[in-house]
Image (cartoon, rainbow, N blue to C red):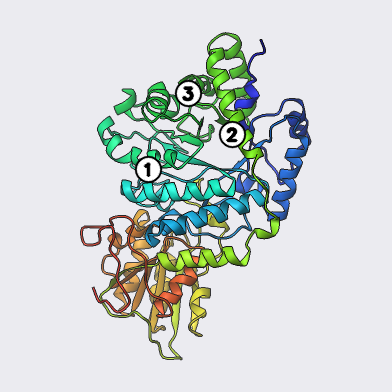
C-alpha cells in the first residue's frame, strides 16, 4: 500500500516575478498541491503573471493541475495588479445588492482564471463587530450576520460560475479581534451560543452556496478550546468537532499563512504544523524558510506515527478533489482582464456604494462658482496590515474632483500626517473656498483626526470623506458634511466626486453601525440636511 504524499498537503510560495529554476525542478520531481502568489513578491503585470502560471503548470508532472492561489478580495486587497479595480466587500455591503455582488464575484473569477489563477482566498465571512479591529475593517461586508451571509453566498456563487475555487475565511470568525494575527495571537471570548447566533451564520451560508475551502483563523477562542494560547488552526474541537461535525463541511480546510505571528515560529512551527494536520487541516499555506522545515517535519511525524495514515489520506483526498474540480474549468482569454464590461461593473458598484451620512451644512450637492478654489487633501496610501495592497494605489482624490471642477489643488500629507503637515494645511486653508479632506482609518490614527479637526476649526466649508472604514466621524464629530467611499481606488473616488457634485445620487447605506445616531442602514439622499 502506498503512503499518502505529504507534498499534496502543501501550498508553497517563492520570491520573484519568474519561477526559480530550483522550484521548477521541485515541481517536476514531487509536485505540491499548489502555490500562492503574493502581490509584492510575485506580481507586476497581467502578462507577467500569465507567463509565470504557464511556467508552473508546464513543470507539473502530476495528472492533476496545480492549485494557483492569491488574495483577490477587491478594494484594499487586490493581489493581481492590472486586473479590474473592483470595490471591496464593505462597499458591496453598502450597495446592498446581492445580485451585484454575485456579478462581481463572477467577473473577478473570470479575470483570475484568464491569468492562470484558480483559487481565491476570499471572501471574508467575518463580521466587523469591532470597529478597532486592525486587520479586518472594509474587508468585511458588514457587521450583522444576515447581511454578511447574503453577500458571502452571492460572492461564492459568482466565483463558482466562473470556475474558480473560493475560500470562506477566517473560521470561525475573527471580526471581534483586537490584535492583528500577523503579529500576535488574538483572543476572542465568544461562547458557543454567541458563535451559533452570529459568527457562524455567514460560514453556514457560504458552505450552502458551495464553498469548497474553509480557511482557519489564527486566533484563540477559549469558548471552544478552553485555551487562550492556542489558535483555532490547531484545534480539533474547532476544525473537526465544529466545522466537520456540526456544520457538516466535507471540503478542504486550509490554514491562514503559517508564517504569521499567531503561530509558533522557528522549531516550534513544526509542532504547530503537526497539530494543525491532526486537528483537521488538509492544506498548509506556507512561504519562505517555513516551507522546507514544515515539509520535513510533517514527513517525519507521519513516519513516526504522530499523524495517522487515515488523517493524511483524507487530507490528500480533499486536496485532489479540489484539483479535479479545477481541471474542468474553462480558461477565458486574457483579453477579458479589465474589459469594458468589467470596468463598467466596477464603476456601478462604486457609484451605488457611496454613502452620505451627514449633510448638516447643506453643502451637498456642491454648487461652486466656476472660479472657486478647492483644496483636496488626503494621506499617502499605505498598507495598514500585511493583508493590504493600498500602497500600490496612487492618491486620486484631486484627480476625481477635477472631473467636475477646474480649480482643485492637491495636497498629499503623510500617513500619519506630521505636525508640520497639520500646521501647513491649516495655514493654507484660508486660501480656499472649499476643502475636501479624505481620511484613511482616522478612527485608528489620532493625527488624522487632529488634521481634520484643525481644518474644520478654520471655518472654511469642509467636506470629509472616509476612504476606508466608516467610523472616522467618531473622531472628528464636528464635521458637518460626511461621506463614506469604503475605498481609495480610483473607481470609488470618481464615484464619490460625482455624488458630491450631484452628477449621481447617493445610493449607499451604512453596512455597519457607526454610532447610535448612525446605525446600520442609515444613508441620506442629496439635499437631506441631517
Could you tell me if residue 129 is visible in this image? Answer: no
Reply above or below: 90 against 396: above
Reply above or below: 365 against 386: below
Quadrant showing the N terminus:
top right
Label 2: which residue? 322
Label 3: which residue? 280
Instruction: For label 2, count other residues whose C-alpha is less than 10 Å away and answer few (under 14), some (14-19) or many (20+).
Output: many
Left or right, residue 490 beside residue 504:
right
Quadrant showing the C terminus:
bottom left
Residue 231 image point, x, y percent = 41, 28
Could you tell me if residue 274 is visible in this image? Answer: yes
CB of mark 2 within 8 Å of CB of mark 1?
A: no
Res. 499 image quadrant: bottom left
Instruction: For label 3, count other residues whose C-alpha is less than 10 Å away and answer few (under 14), some (14-19) or many (20+).
Output: many
Between 399 and 524, the one lying in front of the other is: 524
Between 423 and 444, the one lying in front of the other is: 444
Q: Mark 2 and mark 1: span between their CA atoms?
A: 22 Å
Reply above or below: 208 against 233: below
CB of mark 2 within 8 Å of CB of mark 3?
A: no
The residue shown at (42%, 39%) is 208
Number of callouts in the render? 3
Res. 202 mark: 1
Secondary structure at badge 2 equals: helix
Mark 1, mark 3: which one is toward the viewer?
1
Amino acid at each position: 500500500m502506498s503512503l499518502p504524499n505529504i507534498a499534496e498537503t502543501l501550498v508553497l510560495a517563492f520570491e520573484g516575478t519568474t519561477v526559480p529554476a530550483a522550484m521548477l525542478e521541485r515541481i517536476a520531481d514531487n509536485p505540491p498541491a499548489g502555490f500562492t502568489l503574493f502581490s509584492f513578491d510575485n506580481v507586476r503585470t497581467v502578462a507577467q503573471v500569465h507567463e509565470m502560471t504557464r511556467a508552473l503548470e508546464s513543470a507539473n508532472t502530476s495528472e492533476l493541475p496545480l492549485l494557483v492561489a492569491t488574495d483577490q478580495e477587491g478594494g484594499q486587497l487586490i493581489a493581481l495588479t492590472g486586473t479590474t479595480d473592483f470595490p471591496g466587500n464593505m462597499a458591496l455591503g453598502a450597495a446592498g445588492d446581492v445580485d451585484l455582488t454575485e456579478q462581481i464575484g463572477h467577473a473577478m473569477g473570470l479575470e483570475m482564471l484568464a491569468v492562470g489563477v484558480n483559487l481565491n482566498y476570499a471572501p471574508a465571512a467575518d463580521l466587523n463587530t469591532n470597529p478597532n479591529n486592525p486587520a479586518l475593517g472594509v474587508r468585511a461586508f458588514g457587521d450583522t450576520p444576515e447581511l454578511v451571509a447574503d453577500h458571502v453566498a452571492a460572492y461564492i456563487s459568482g466565483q463558482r460560475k466562473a470556475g474558480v475555487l473560493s475560500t470562506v475565511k477566517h473560521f470561525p470568525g475573527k471580526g471581534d479581534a483586537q490584535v492583528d494575527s500577523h503579529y500576535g495571537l488574538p483572543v476572542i471570548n465568544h461562547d458557543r451560543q454567541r458563535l451559533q447566533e452570529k459568527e457562524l451564520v455567514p460560514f453556514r451560508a457560504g458552505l450552502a452556496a458551495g464553498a469548497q475551502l474553509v480557511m482557519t483563523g489564527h486566533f484563540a477562542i477559549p469558548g471552544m478550546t478552553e485555551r487562550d494560547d492556542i489558535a483555532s488552526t490547531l484545534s480539533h474541537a474547532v476544525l473537526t468537532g465544529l466545522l466537520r461535525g456540526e456544520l457538516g463541511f466535507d471540503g478542504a480546510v486550509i490554514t491562514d499563512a503559517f508564517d504569521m505571528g499567531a503561530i509558533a515560529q522557528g522549531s516550534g512551527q513544526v509542532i504547530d504544523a503537526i497539530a494543525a494536520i491532526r486537528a483537521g487541516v488538509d492544506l498548509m499555506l506556507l512561504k519562505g524558510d517555513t516551507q522546507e522545515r514544515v515539509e520535513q517535519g510533517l514527513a517525519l511525524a507521519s513516519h513516526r506515527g504522530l499523524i495517522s495514515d487515515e488523517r493524511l489520506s483524507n487530507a490528500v483526498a480533499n486536496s485532489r478533489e479540489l484539483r479535479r474540480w479545477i481541471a474542468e474549468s474553462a480558461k477565458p482569454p486574457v483579453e477579458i482582464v479589465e474589459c469594458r464590461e468589467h470596468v463598467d461593473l466596477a464603476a456601478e458598484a462604486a457609484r451605488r456604494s457611496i454613502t452620505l451620512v451627514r449633510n448638516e451644512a447643506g453643502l451637498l450637492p456642491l454648487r461652486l462658482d466656476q472660479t472657486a478654489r478647492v483644496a483636496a487633501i488626503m494621506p499617502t496610501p499605505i498598507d495598514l496590515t500585511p493583508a493590504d495592497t493600498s500602497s500600490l494605489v496612487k492618491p486620486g482624490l484631486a484627480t476625481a474632483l477635477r472631473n467636475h471642477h477646474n480649480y482643485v489643488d492637491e495636497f498629499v500629507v503623510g500617513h500619519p500626517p506630521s505636525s508640520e503637515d497639520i500646521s501647513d494645511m491649516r495655514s493654507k486653508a484660508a486660501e480656499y473656498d472649499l476643502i475636501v479632506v479624505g481620511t484613511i482609518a482616522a478612527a485608528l490614527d489620532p493625527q488624522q483626526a487632529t488634521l481634520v479637526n484643525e481644518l474644520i476649526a478654520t471655518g472654511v466649508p469642509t467636506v470629509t470623506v472616509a476612504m476606508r472604514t466608516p467610523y472616522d466621524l467618531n473622531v472628528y464629530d464636528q464635521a458637518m458634511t460626511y461621506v463614506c467611499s469604503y475605498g481609495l481606488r480610483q473607481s470609488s473616488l470618481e464615484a464619490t466626486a460625482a455624488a458630491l457634485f450631484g452628477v449621481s445620487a447617493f445610493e449607499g447605506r451604512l453596512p455597519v453601525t457607526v454610532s447610535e445616531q448612525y446605525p446600520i442602514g442609515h444613508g441620506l439622499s442629496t439635499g437631506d440636511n441631517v
